[in-house]
Amino acid sequence: MEKLNDFEVWFVTGSQHLYGEEVLKEVKEDSKKIVKGLNNSAQIPYKIVFKSVLTNPNSIKDFFQAANSNEKCIGIVTWMHTFSPAKMWIAGLKALDKPFVHLHTQYNKEIPWSEIDMNFMNTNQSAHGGREYGYIVSRMKKRRKVIVGYWQDSDVLEELGRWIRVAAAWHDAQGAKIARFGDNMRNVAVTEGDKVEAEIRFGYSVNGYGIGDLVEYVNKIDDKKLEQEVKLLKENYNIQQTIDEDFNQSIKTAIQIELGMRAFLEEGNFKGFTTTFENLHGLKQLPGLAVQRLMADGYGFGAEGDWKTAALVRAMKVMSKGLEGGTSFMEQYTYHLADDDMKVLGAHMLEVCETLAEETPFLEVHPLGIGGKADPARLIFNTPDKPAINASIIDLGNRFRMVVNDVQVETIDESLPKLPVARVVWKPQPDLKTAVKAWILSGGAHHTGFSQAINAKYMEDFADIAGIEYIHIGENTNISELKDKIKYNEVYYKLEKE
């Protein structure tokens, strides 16, 4: 994830030569001051670079082409300080293949009522120029983010900062590689999907590797390195279990699998991976601890071969970099259906990321009861009572759909002595019955990307950039309206393909 620090967002201002060189100088200086102000805000996660004032079709096209080919540039902020005739933007917008924002703001916050004249009006006419620019972008059906408001206001900075994080995740996905160790869990439907269409739509590629390929890396781990890592592991987590020979051997095996996986993923420059308990030949235990720790380092993960969720978790990890709260692979496992206290228990066999932990996790070894392997090591913890989201991407055959549900995590008051796994309990919004019915009607998967660091607005921005369907289940969800939306969307996406 360190390479993300090099990301840049390019800022460009639209104008024209009609108003004279003095106005263009003022436009340029105002643009630089805005960019400086944006960069001084803690809400902006990556550096914004002012590039130019664009005043003719050739300079606009050259700028967009340069942005396309620049590896550091993750997206573009466009601002119309004056009126900028929009036909000048057509060739450039046609060439552009990176996400962009239309920042509809102006340099001055208030109208200087006693001093305003036509010179001021001509120079500060974002209200005019932004509509001209907005028209041509809409006419060309280019996807973009529109942010309206004064550039120093907190809500504008928050919205721009959020979009920049999403643009970083999108940029990270372009050319990303997801490794599948084994195949999908047999006969499961929702974890399947069109990997070719996913690469076309999202930019990442998915390829399968035999467990034997991974085992070779696991078996090559140096004993000295292994002992060092085992020692560090015991120092970093809580241990209450009796440390005997079986415990030590299980921990050693788990770390050996982790180091082998890490070597495989680093050498192949992968950003996410999947495993499945049905494909473990050559491994002594299910990779549970390894998955938890690799996710904590930023890798995307999906269980049972669920590559769509692995890619989604990676994207959510990139979006949430540096924010408070964890992000993880999750499964909606079982319900508590008490009349006045309905909620969901989320967990998996082992693989929940430790970034969700309320306190330092416990390191333990227990039987698993699935997979037919030795007792695996795992980290056990509860999750703090904060808002969160569950997000799912599904393949509907003719399109991808993202489904997102707002949830409220609750403290687990019970000790759960016979459930030694990482776990989360949450109440879905607006309530369990409505949320679950909406999720099922939308076709949402049982696997999700779960995050307490980001909210549904991030996911909506991501869906917009990707050009996929978006369903949000929250406090205002109405089942009848949702059914209608799904029907209307079906017609829209069918016509879009034609």
Image (cartoon, helix red, strand yellow):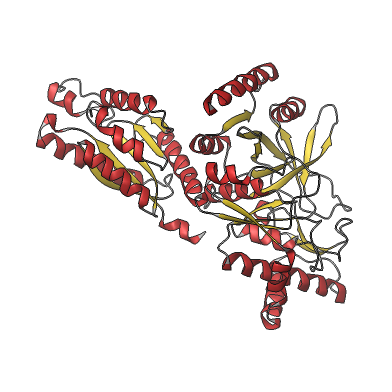
Front-most of 234 and 316? 316
Most foreground residue, 212 or 310: 212
Frontmost residue, 219 versus 327? 219
Q: What residue sits 15% from the left and 37% below the top?
A: 24
Task: Examine the rendering and report whether any part of residue 97 can be seen.
Answer: yes
Occupied quadrant, residue 488: top right
User: Residue 249, image x and y in percent?
Assistant: 82, 74
Which percent across, then down, holds residue 316? 58, 47
Q: Residue at x 89, y 53 (%)?
A: 418
Up the image or down, 432 lies above or below 167; here it is above
Above or below residue 19? Residue 5 is: below
Q: Is residue 285 left or right of residue 231?
A: right
Is 241 left, or right, of 125 in this rendering?
right
Counting from the top left corner in percent of width and height, residue 434 is at 73, 24
Q: Residue at x 29, y 36 (%)?
A: 91
Quadrant in the picture for residue 27: top left
Residue plotted at (81% across, 70% down): 250
Please give left or right for residue 358 compared with residue 365 in the image.
left
